Image (spheres, helix red, strand yellow):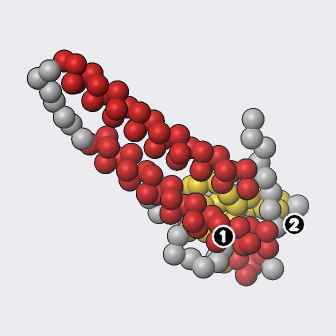
Amino acid sequence: MAVKKYLTIEEAQKLVPDVRKSILKIMKLNTAIELLGEIEVSYTDETESVFSEIKFNKKFHSLCFRLFTRLESLMEKGAVLDNIEKGAVNFFSVYKNKPVVLCWKIGDKKIKYWYDVDEDFSEKKPLSLLR
């Protein structure tokens, strides 16, 4: 069972370059999985059909395994993917003895926002309020 990892703002910020690389790879893997799921091929030969299905499933599961391995690696570092399409990531932290969520997404150079754990992203606040 994974244990929630709490990071300081500085620790989370140091992870951003590696997290960015991982998120870009995760997004590509997710796109490949989605595209693979849209492919439909039919065969008149039963043997060809079975062989093709085996090859398809090997590729599909290989991509899924790689995606979930990267997600697991992110979580072990303390980064939690919140939205795969937006490349949004959360880091858990503590401010004044209360747990908070630090928010980062692809395209941002630094973590810019945070919110209380009992709030949602729409209630985000500038990171400057935590300093």
Image quarter hosting the N terminus: top right
Q: What residue sits right under mark 2 in the picture?
A: 96
Measured as percent of width and height from the top left, residue 117 is found at 71, 56
Marks 1 and 2, the one that precedes in the sequence: 1
At numbered mark 2, what does the secondary structure look like: helix, strand or loop?
loop
Name of the residue lying farthest toward the top: 46
Query: Is residue 98 at least partly visible in the picture?
Result: yes
Q: Nearer the viewer, mark 1 or mark 2?
A: 1
Image quarter hosting the C terminus: bottom right
| Mark 1–mark 2 distance (CA, rounded to whole Å) | 23 Å
Name of the residue lying farthest toward the right: 97
Quarter holding residue 41: top left
Q: Please, is residue 99 above or below residue 13 in the view?
A: above
Do the residues under discs 1 and 2 have CB atoms within 8 angstroms? no
* Residue found 51% across the figure and 55% down from its top: 26
Q: Is residue 106 left or right of residue 16?
A: left
Measured as percent of width and height from the top left, residue 75 is found at 68, 51
Q: What residue sits right under mark 1 in the picture?
A: 16
Q: Amino acid at mark 2?
A: Lys
* Residue found 80% across the figure and 62% down from its top: 7
Q: Amino acid at mark 1?
A: Val
Q: Is residue 77 left or right of residue 17?
A: right
Measured as percent of width and height from the top left, residue 9 is found at 78, 71
* Residue found 65% across the figure and 46% down from its top: 72
Of 25 and 16, nearer the camera is 25
* Residue found 66% across the figure and 54% down from its top: 74
The 10 Å Cα crowd at callout 2, few under 14, some 14 to 19, many 20 or more, is: few
At numbered mark 1, what does the secondary structure look like: helix, strand or loop?
helix
